[in-house]
Image: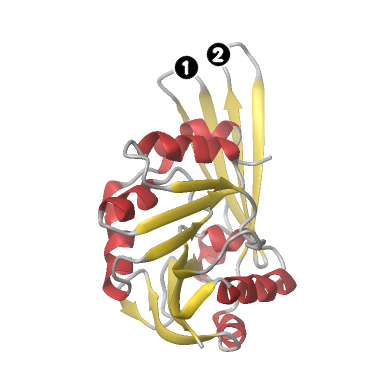
Amino acid sequence: MIYNTLAGYYDTLVKDDEATQDWVNWIERFVKPCSVLELACGSGEITEQLSKAGYQMSALDLSAQMVEQAKTKDVEGNISFFVQDMKDLSNFSKFDAILCLCDSFNYILSKEEVSHFFKEVSDHLNDNGYFLFDTHSLDRMDEFEEEWNETGVFEDGCGYQWSISSENDWLYQDFAFYLPNGEMIQEHHLQKIYEPSWLEEELNTYFEILSVNTDFVEEGIQEGEKYFYVLRKR
């Protein structure tokens, strides 16, 4: 199970207050405070900021450990958290907006699953509801064609190695954690990158595409790290 050991160190590795604010600002441009379901919420940084801004937040993640990290930030107890797969929302009613952020979408590993996922999201949106998500850009495959590595030691003495590589339309992230007691724990993460033209064709079945940007501010599909989609249910 991914995000088991990583959950405890996730914020130390990737927390970025400026980036979190960028995501919140992007969401606020299109969606005013309303009922929101965040898919694959991770450690809940964006979830908590939206809750403080007046959004009625529900959030889920497949990793129980990540949900526990997210709950520690919700000191007011305003957010409803769930441990479950984002590809099955059958236990939920409908929301005004659904979010899937921070390249979580790329953990959906087949076109068939993507098509089902888009339908599932549409089915759980109110009329004219919004769906906002981001995805790795095609440029990420070139960026990590040569393996990237980072090593370090956390405050508790646990060492780590983090590597990212790409092959065809697959992105591989591998973590090794070297515990102070000598034990090593590994996590292997697999993500898939999809052609924007195919994504837009699938999205058009269920949604009106309101905005597509690269890295928040560049209009359309351009060179960059992520594509950002704003959609409204048809």
Local SS, label 1 = loop
Local SS, label 2 = loop
- The alpha-carbon separation of the residues under discs 1 and 2 comes to 6 Å
- The residue at the point 69 percent across, 63 percent down is 109
Q: Amino acid at mark 1?
A: Gly
What residue is shown with label 1?
A: 157
Q: Amino acid at mark 2?
A: Pro
Query: x, y percentage for residue 42?
Result: 49, 47
Q: Earlier in the sequence, mark 1 or mark 2?
A: 1
Residue 143 or 180: which is nearer the viewer? 180
- The residue at the point 52 percent across, 69 percent down is 94
Mark 1 and mark 2 in contact? Answer it, CB < 8 Å.
yes
Residue 22 or 232: which is nearer the viewer? 232
Query: x, y percentage for residue 145?
Result: 58, 59
36 sits to left or right of 147: left
182 sits to left or right of 67: right
What residue is shown with label 2?
A: 180
Query: x, y percentage for residue 168?
Result: 67, 67
Query: Which mark is drawn over residue 117?
Result: none
Q: Residues within 10 Å of mark 2 (few under 14, many from 20)?
A: few
- The residue at the point 69 percent across, 73 percent down is 116
Query: x, y percentage for residue 136?
Result: 51, 65
